[in-house]
Amino acid sequence: MAGSLKAGDTLLIDSLDLTLPAGRWSALLGPSGVGKTSLLRLIAGLPCAAHLKGRLKAGDGAPIAPRVAMMAQDDQLLPWACALDNVTICARLRGEPAQTERAAALLARVGLGGLERRKPANLSAGQRQRVALARTLYEDRAVVLLDEPFSALDAMTRHTVQDLAAGLLAGRTVVLITHDPAEAIRLADVAWILTRAGIAPCILPPTMPPRAPEAAATISAQAALLKRMRLLAAQGAG
Ligand SMILES: Nc1ncnc2c1ncn2[C@@H]1O[C@H](COP(=O)(O)OP(=O)(O)OP(=O)(O)O)[C@@H](O)[C@H]1O
């Protein structure tokens, strides 16, 4: 994508020249309100307060929106539907028959085998986000947009679900929005900080994600990224 991002007359990101590599995890960081969620919604072709003055296209020239699945911070599960029915909900809303065996297999893959008939109220936050991950996988799309999907989880659960997502979404084009430098360093193949002035690439360790949080290279990259984000914020670039 290239151009400038605006909400009404307000400039959000001036010079947005961004290539998200196919089949890899790209992390987008940046201050609150800079336009991260808006960007994801534009990629997904969803209604959005912001608009891109410029171009947004896939490398193969085909439409992007039909190839997209999204996962948000909120699990967005239907409270009256069981885990299995939540996994198949998007397909059923499209009028497609539910593939219950495939949905059950996905629930098993995210560690929820045996809980297919549980309602969201009877699942933990981590389990609910696993159902949301299974629902995203059920859509089987090449492009997966993750809008802070792990941020509401406690540290231990976050770690587990991050590992799960890294394994199950490998090979897809993933765009991860996060406020957490540790998460970006751990999961991303490439990462950028979005600011009002434009985008700043992040330096990531040379190892493959998901990176061990205790590795010296991971820790120093996190510290450097946090320092850079603070510097950019202090400069008022965000
Ligand atoms: N209906 C609207 N009309 C005008 N501006 C809007 C509207 N909705 C959102 N905005 C503005 O668009 C900007 C981008 O919002 P967006 O949610 O994309 O930011 P974000 O970077 O994802 O923020 P956060 O990290 O807090 O989720 C914000 O500055 C917000 O104030």
Image (cartoon, rainbow, N blue to C red):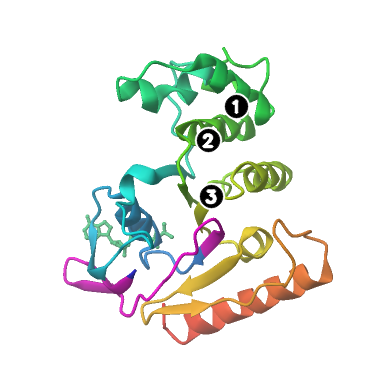
Residue 121 appears in the picture as rendered: no
- Residue shown at the point (26%, 68%) measured from the top left: 55
Give the extent of the magenta segment: 2-27
> Of the residues under marks 3 and 1, which one precedes in the sequence?
1
Query: In the image as oriented, which residue stretches furthest toward the front?
Result: 60
Viewer-nearest of labels 3 and 1?
Answer: 3
CA gap, disc 2 and disc 1: 7 Å
Q: Amino acid at mark 3?
A: Arg
The residue where tag 1 is placed is 106
Mark 1 Cα shell of 10 Å, populated few (<14), some (14-19), many (≥20): many
Q: Quadrant of the C terminus?
A: bottom left
Taking the image as shown, residue 107 lies to the left or right of residue 3, namely right
Query: Are the residues flagged by discs 2 and 3 in contact, CB closer than 8 Å?
Result: no
- Residue shown at the point (59%, 16%) measured from the top left: 116
Taking the image as shown, residue 197 lies to the left or right of residue 206, namely left
View quadrant of ligand 1: bottom left
Residue 82 location (% of width, % of height): 51, 16
Whether residue 20 is in magenta: the answer is yes
Q: Amino acid at mark 1?
A: Leu
CA gap, disc 3 and disc 1: 16 Å
Query: In the image as oriented, which residue stretches furthest toward the top?
Result: 117
Taking the image as shown, residue 105 lies to the left or right of residue 13, namely right
Give the image quarter of residue 190: bottom right
Q: Amino acid at mark 2?
A: Leu
Q: Nearer the viewer, residue 60 or 16?
A: 60
Q: Say above or below: 85 vs 162.
A: above
Viewer-nearest of labels 2 and 3?
Answer: 3
The residue where tag 3 is placed is 172
Query: In the image as oriented, which residue stretches furthest toward the bottom?
Result: 235
Question: Dot 1 lies on which element?
Answer: helix
Mark 2 Cα shell of 10 Å, populated few (<14), some (14-19), many (≥20): many
The residue where tag 2 is placed is 137
